[in-house]
């Protein structure tokens, strides 16, 4: 009996050697991965199971399995099982790496119209409901999605991934005392902390640290450690609910809870990857695995074996104890390594600490013969007990001639779509703040509201563009000019009123303050500052309002986030919901742009440049339509916009461009839409270069644009003086340069 077992083990070892040689040279197809005539049944079925678990099984494996004996014999010795498991691990790792590298998501960005609102991923054409995998919104005319980590769970720090179930990847969990625990979770048991990390349970007991002379003992605090009355350590004040870290002891965490400071040091969890595959992020306490691996312990069908454990490159059988390092003792329990790790005490010697002696667990401080009375940092001397501030996050204190510093730890934040991370003055950590609202008016007036609603309204009167309808701090009105047409209009002036100050921005960038024309730059103390910026007028009001005006119909209004939900007018209500932007003065929500725009008319009929009636659909000649399309096709074909078309959907701008080109007899009416789109591109970091010339907005117009139609076709001849309709004739200094993005208003 012994000789038969010994023979099986030897055969498996021989086959494993050949198997390793095959893996080192690579394989091209199924016949080479599991050669029919090379290996016995002892190795064939495990090999096939590896292929299936790795997700790259071929049809030939099932056919070949039928020709072999039913179940492979399992070697009786653990050495044989260990060698077999090692070969399977190598194979599955190789296959998972190859398979992952070839996985490519293909498709095109989907356009959308419900700007700023969620987009549900539920469609009959999809194989499943992907709403739990991704959170999607409509942004800049495209569907943008981010991982639905709330539903799937975080996978960034996962060391061992299980086969994907549905849309969510899953990190390997832990079985402990008959209960399954998800990876990255913690629980308490007998004043100990247990943490599951990808199939490894680490049991630790925190070490308390007291940074004050007279601590108080309170229960239910930070690991039941003594607390200090004041939330200050090494000169650094800790905010309520915030953590602070010590550079010399990155694993020491001090937290301010209800005005009291408690500190504790914890040991790092045991990781299943090798030390060579571990890295520690800057400022962090514990290492992480560089790359996640697939679950390497694959159960073999038809056996009742308990699962072994893999820590690094070492294989550990079920119920066998082993030691990871001098601080850590482990036992493998059916695939979960349960480890007890000692927590080293907090050291006060910082960088002078000596590494652990051979066979010892913790570092130690060297003996100091005489303490110094002061700290010399650079050219400054600080006496014992004196503190100094390095920045908003870090402070230091002199202790026995050595500086001890503390640094506030900022939480990881993920902002909603209508917010962005911003560093506020004097604050250590970034905060999620509301994004400033931007409303744009251009061309034959086309409007993009603060919330992203896009519409056109050709009214030729005076209108309320935006106003603080809650506190009445400001109002912006625009006057639209019909320019001797029956159906079109362009913005002629924009007026900002703040209190008793009235600032009017007119044609050719003429500026009046309370009725008197001023020369730029001009400053109104306590109200606003007006300057020229790259061929436009830039008005910055102290209350968080900014207006950019080019003197010829292009107007951009930027408002601070403090006005969120307080505005009304043609630019909408600024509440992050584009669907309710078309509310009339009396609060009715309409879908008719003419009725909506007319409800915000001010100044009576005197302010109108033609009789107000709903414009009827215009019938344009085919040649006019074709020329408009040719002028406006550049959003998709000009190289200058290539980077931007994947970030900002040009559809609305192209439609606006064609409307302007058809309704105007000038040669550059289409340029307003290009200019507005280029401005949007600049805001998303894809500023187009030298677009004006290729779009025929600079230099001579294309020769085919001014060709007259055949005699008798009824074509309206072009006006001799088209300066009123041609934005290009207005001089713009430095017009070749793009306008700068609006500054932050916080």
Image (tube, grey):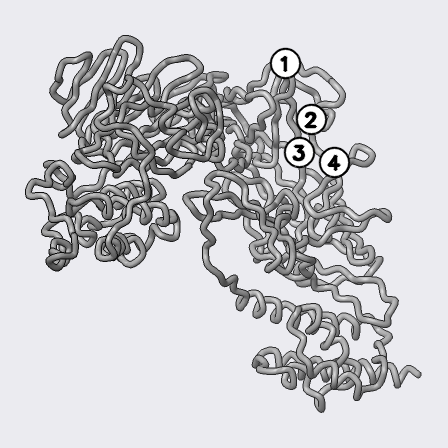
The CA span between labels 3 and 1 is 23 Å
The CA span between labels 2 and 4 is 13 Å
In-front residue for pair 678/396: 678
Circle 1 SS class = loop
User: Residue 580 got which mark?
Assistant: none
Of the image marks 2 and 1, the number of the one nearer the N terminus = 2
User: Residue 345 got which mark?
Assistant: 3
The CA span between labels 2 and 1 is 14 Å
CB within 8 Å, label 3 to label 4: no
Q: Residue furthest front?
A: 712
Nearer the observer: mark 2 or 3; the answer is 2
Of the image marks 3 and 4, the number of the one nearer the N terminus = 4
CB within 8 Å, label 3 to label 1: no
Nearer the observer: mark 3 or 1; the answer is 1
Circle 4 SS class = loop
Circle 2 SS class = helix
The CA span between labels 4 and 1 is 24 Å
The CA span between labels 2 and 3 is 16 Å
Of the image marks 2 and 4, the number of the one nearer the N terminus = 4
Q: Could you tell whether 293 is left or right of 181 in the image? A: left
Residue at which label 4 appears: 205
Circle 3 SS class = loop
Nearer the observer: mark 2 or 4; the answer is 2
Q: Residues within 10 Å of mark 4 (few under 14, many from 20)?
A: many
Q: Looking at the picture, how far across and down is residue 369, in whole percent?
A: 54, 27
Nearer the observer: mark 3 or 4; the answer is 4
Q: Could you tell whether 440 is left or right of 708 in the image? A: right
Q: Is any atom of residue 359 visible in this view?
A: no
Residue at horizontal 53 percent and vertical 66 percent from the top: 101
Residue at which label 2 appears: 222
CB within 8 Å, label 2 to label 1: no
């Amino acid at each position: 009996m012994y000789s038969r077992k010994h023979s099986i083990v030897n055969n498996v070892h021989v086959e494993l050697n050949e198997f390793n040689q095959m893996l080192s040279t690579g394989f091209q197809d199924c016949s080479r991965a599991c050669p029919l005539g090379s290996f016995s049944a002892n190795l064939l079925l495990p090999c096939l199971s590896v292929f299936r678990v790795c997700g790259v099984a071929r049809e030939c494996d099932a056919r070949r399995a039928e020709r072999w004996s039913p179940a492979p014999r399992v070697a009786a010795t653990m050495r044989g099982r260990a060698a077999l498991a090692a070969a399977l691990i190598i194979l599955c790792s190789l296959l998972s790496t190859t398979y992952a590298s070839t996985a490519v998501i293909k498709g095109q960005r989907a356009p959308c119209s419900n700007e700023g609102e969620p987009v549900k991923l539920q469609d009959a054409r999809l194989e499943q409901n992907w709403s739990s995998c991704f959170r999607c919104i409509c942004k800049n005319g495209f569907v943008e999605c981010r991982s639905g980590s709330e539903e799937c769970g975080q996978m960034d720090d996962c060391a061992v991934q299980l086969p994907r179930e549905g849309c969510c990847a899953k990190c390997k969990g832990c079985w402990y005392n008959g209960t399954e625990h998800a990876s990255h979770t913690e629980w308490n048991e007998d004043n100990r902390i247990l943490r599951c990390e990808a199939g490894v349970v680490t049991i630790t007991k925190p070490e308390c640290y007291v940074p004050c002379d007279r601590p108080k003992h309170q229960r239910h605090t930070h690991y039941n450690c003594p607390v200090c009355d004041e939330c200050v350590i090494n000169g650094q004040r800790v905010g309520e609910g915030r953590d602070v870290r010590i550079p010399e002891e990155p694993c020491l965490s001090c937290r301010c809870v209800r005005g009291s400071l408690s500190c504790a040091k914890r040991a790092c969890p045991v990781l299943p990857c090798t030390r060579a595959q571990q890295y520690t992020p800057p400022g962090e306490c514990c290492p992480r695995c560089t790359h996640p691996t697939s679950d390497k312990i694959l159960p073999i069908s038809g056996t009742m074996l308990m699962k072994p454990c893999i820590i690094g490159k070492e294989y550990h059988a079920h119920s066998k104890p082993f030691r990871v390092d001098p601080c850590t003792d482990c036992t493998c329990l059916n695939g979960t390594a349960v480890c007890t790790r000692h927590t080293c005490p907090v050291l006060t010697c910082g960088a002078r600490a000596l590494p652990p002696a051979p066979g010892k667990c913790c570092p130690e401080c060297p003996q100091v013969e005489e303490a110094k009375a002061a700290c010399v940092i650079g050219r400054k001397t600080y006496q014992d007990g004196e503190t100094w501030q390095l920045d908003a996050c870090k402070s230091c204190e002199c202790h026995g001639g050595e500086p001890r510093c503390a640094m506030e730890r900022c939480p990881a934040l993920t902002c909603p779509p209508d917010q962005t991370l911003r560093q506020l003055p004097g604050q250590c950590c970034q905060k999620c703040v509301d994004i400033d609202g931007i409303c744009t008016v251009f061309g034959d007036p086309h409007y993009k509201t603060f919330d992203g609603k896009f519409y056109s309204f050709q009214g030729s009167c005076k209108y309320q563009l935006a106003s603080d309808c809650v506190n009445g701090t400001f109002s912006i009105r625009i006057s639209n000019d019909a320019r001797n047409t029956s159906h079109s209009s362009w913005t002629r002036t924009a007026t900002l009123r703040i209190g008793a100050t009235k600032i009017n921005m007119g044609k050719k960038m003429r500026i009046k303050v309370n009725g008197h024309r001023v020369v730029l730059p001009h400053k109104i103390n306590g109200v606003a500052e007006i300057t020229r910026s790259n061929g436009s007028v830039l008005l910055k009001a102290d209350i968080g309002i900014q207006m950019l005006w080019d003197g010829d119909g292009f107007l951009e209004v930027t408002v601070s986030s403090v006005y969120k939900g307080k505005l009304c007018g043609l630019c909408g209500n600024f509440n992050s919901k584009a669907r309710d932007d078309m509310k009339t003065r009396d609060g009715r929500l309409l879908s008719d742009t003419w009725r909506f725009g007319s409800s915000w008319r001010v100044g009576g009929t005197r302010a109108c440049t033609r009789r107000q009636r709903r414009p009827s659909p215009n019938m344009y000649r085919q040649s006019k339509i074709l020329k408009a399309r040719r002028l406006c096709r550049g959003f998709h074909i000009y190289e200058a916009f290539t980077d931007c078309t994947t970030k900002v959907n040009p559809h609305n701008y192209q439609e606006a461009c064609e409307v302007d080109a058809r309704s105007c007899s000038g040669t550059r009416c289409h340029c307003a839409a290009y200019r507005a789109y280029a401005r949007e591109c600049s805001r998303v970091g894809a500023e187009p270069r030298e677009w004006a010339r290729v779009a025929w907005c600079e230099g001579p117009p294309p020769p085919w644009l001014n060709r007259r139609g055949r005699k008798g076709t009824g074509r309206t001849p072009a006006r001799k003086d088209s300066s009123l309709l041609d934005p290009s004739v207005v001089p713009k200094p430095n017009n070749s340069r793009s306008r700068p993005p609006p500054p932050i208003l916080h």
